[in-house]
């Protein structure tokens, strides 16, 4: 009998052009394409093993997980288990290298690592595209943590046609994400609820009308390695997503006062020729995107802002891989 066990590592990713709102909730098909960078050192390592425990067990960061969180993991694994015809209980052990649920996309790295570890443990051989689609069913943005480096998620209109692929390898551009942590507590409203609430915003359609242009501008900036052009569209796209969040039903305010102070500081820094741009996910932390040459100045500046609790650095990284 062959061993059914595998360990995978997957990075979190930060979206430069965001995904917020879906055209199919069950399949997690997004309303628009999105673009992201995998983040070095901000990752989840997951071991999946079948047949070695009495019942399905999920352990995350040393804690036995129960309720909805456990169900989400197990129903994801059930889909693979059914496809392969395996009924043995599973044991999942997962470890994050960063605070969970603080807007650092633990669900993206988590489900990307889970997709790879589960299929590898069951000796399934999936293409990168198939693995990306599978990860998407766990958490939409998890599909972007499968391919390497800078990634585009094609929205698609079916399970198979909605997947992410690598636009450029990590070495293509020495972009740095300097993350200003302003709060460690878990967010009140998760993205699963947020994607549905978004559609109630009068600005939802307005954002969708603009997002194609944002994608085009970002891709053009990538091809030309035009950093100011990229930075501007990154910040603009994130603000347009937050305008939708704040005007959805319920109103979702993911920022705190420090978040806003950082945004204002960046305006001043750019006026003083320091090229740094913000993008913010469903949480109060600010991802400050800059080039490596400006990293130290950006770190110093962020540490001087009242309320910034810590600063983390991420550079472009590979996608999910087996350990
Ligand atoms: O994959 P989800 O459901 O956690 O949604 C991610 C949403 C944002 O992080 C806010 C934006 C994005 O594209 O990553």
Image (tube, rainbow, N blue to C red):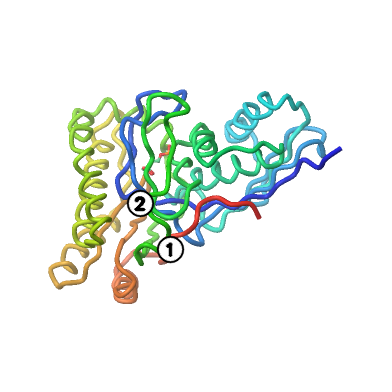
Location of residue 216 in the rendering, given as x and y in whole percent from the top left corner:
22, 44
Q: Is mark 1 within 8 Å of ligand 1?
A: no
Left or right of 7? Residue 239 is: left
In the rendered image, which residue does mark 1 sit on?
A: 314
The label shown at residue 284 is 2
Location of residue 294 in the rendering, given as x and y in whole percent from the top left corner:
29, 73
- Label 2 residue SS: loop
- Within-10-Å neighbours for mark 2: few <14, some 14–19, many 20+: many
When the figure is inspected, residue 274 is found, relative to residue 252, above or below; the finding is below
Left or right of 264? Residue 86 is: right
When the figure is inspected, residue 13 is found, relative to residue 204, above or below; the finding is below
When the figure is inspected, residue 271 is found, relative to residue 238, above or below; the finding is below
Residue at 53%, 55% (x, y): give it. Answer: 43
Contact flag, marks 1 and 2 (Cβ < 8 Å): no
Residue at 67%, 51% (x, y): give it. Answer: 62
Q: Is residue 64 visible?
A: no
* Ligand 1 quadrant in view: top left
Residue at 71%, 41% (x, y): give it. Answer: 121
Q: Which is closer to the viewer, label 1 or label 2?
A: 1
Quadrant assignment, res 39? bottom left
Question: First in sequence: mark 1 or mark 2?
Answer: 2
Residue at 69%, 28% (x, y): give it. Answer: 81
- Between 267 and 7, the one lying in front of the other is 7
- Marks counted in the figure total 2
Q: Quadrant of the N terminus?
A: top right
Q: Quadrant of the C terminus?
A: bottom right
User: Hey, which residue is sitting farthest right in the picture?
Assistant: 1
């Amino acid at each position: 009998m062959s061993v059914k066990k595998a360990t995978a590592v997957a990075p979190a990713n930060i979206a430069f052009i965001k995904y917020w709102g879906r055209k199919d909730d069950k399949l997690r098909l997004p309303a628009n394409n999105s673009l992201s960078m995998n983040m070095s050192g901000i990752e989840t390592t997951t071991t999946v093993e079948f047949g070695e425990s009495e019942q399905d067990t999920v352990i995350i960061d040393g804690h036995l997980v129960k309720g909805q969180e456990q169900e989400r993991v197990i129903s994801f694994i059930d889909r693979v288990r059914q496809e392969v015809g395996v009924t043995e209980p599973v044991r999942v052990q997962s470890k994050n290298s960063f605070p969970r649920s603080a807007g650092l996309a633990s669900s993206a790295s988590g489900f990307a690592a889970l997709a790879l570890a589960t299929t590898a443990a069951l000796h399934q051989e999936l293409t990168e595209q198939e693995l990306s689609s599978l990860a998407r069913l766990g958490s939409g943005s998890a599909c972007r943590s499968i391919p390497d480096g800078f990634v585009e998620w094609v929205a698609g209109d079916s399970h198979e046609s909605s997947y992410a692929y690598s636009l450029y390898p990590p070495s293509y551009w020495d972009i740095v994400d300097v993350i200003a942590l302003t709060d460690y507590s878990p967010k009140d409203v998760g993205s699963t609820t947020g994607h549905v609430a978004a559609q109630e915003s009068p600005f939802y359609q307005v954002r969708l009308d603009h997002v194609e242009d944002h994608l085009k501008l970002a891709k053009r900036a990538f091809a030309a390695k035009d950093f100011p052009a990229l930075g501007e569209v990154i910040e603009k796209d994130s603000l347009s997503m937050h305008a939708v969040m704040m005007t959805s039903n319920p109103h979702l305010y993911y920022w705190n006062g420090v978040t806003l102070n950082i945004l204002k500081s960046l305006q001043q820094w750019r006026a003083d020729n320091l090229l740094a741009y913000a993008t913010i996910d469903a949480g109060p932390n600010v991802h400050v995107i800059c080039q490596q040459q400006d990293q130290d100045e950006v770190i110093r500046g962020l540490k001087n802002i009242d309320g910034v609790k810590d600063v983390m650095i991420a550079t472009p990284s590979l996608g999910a891989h087996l350990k």
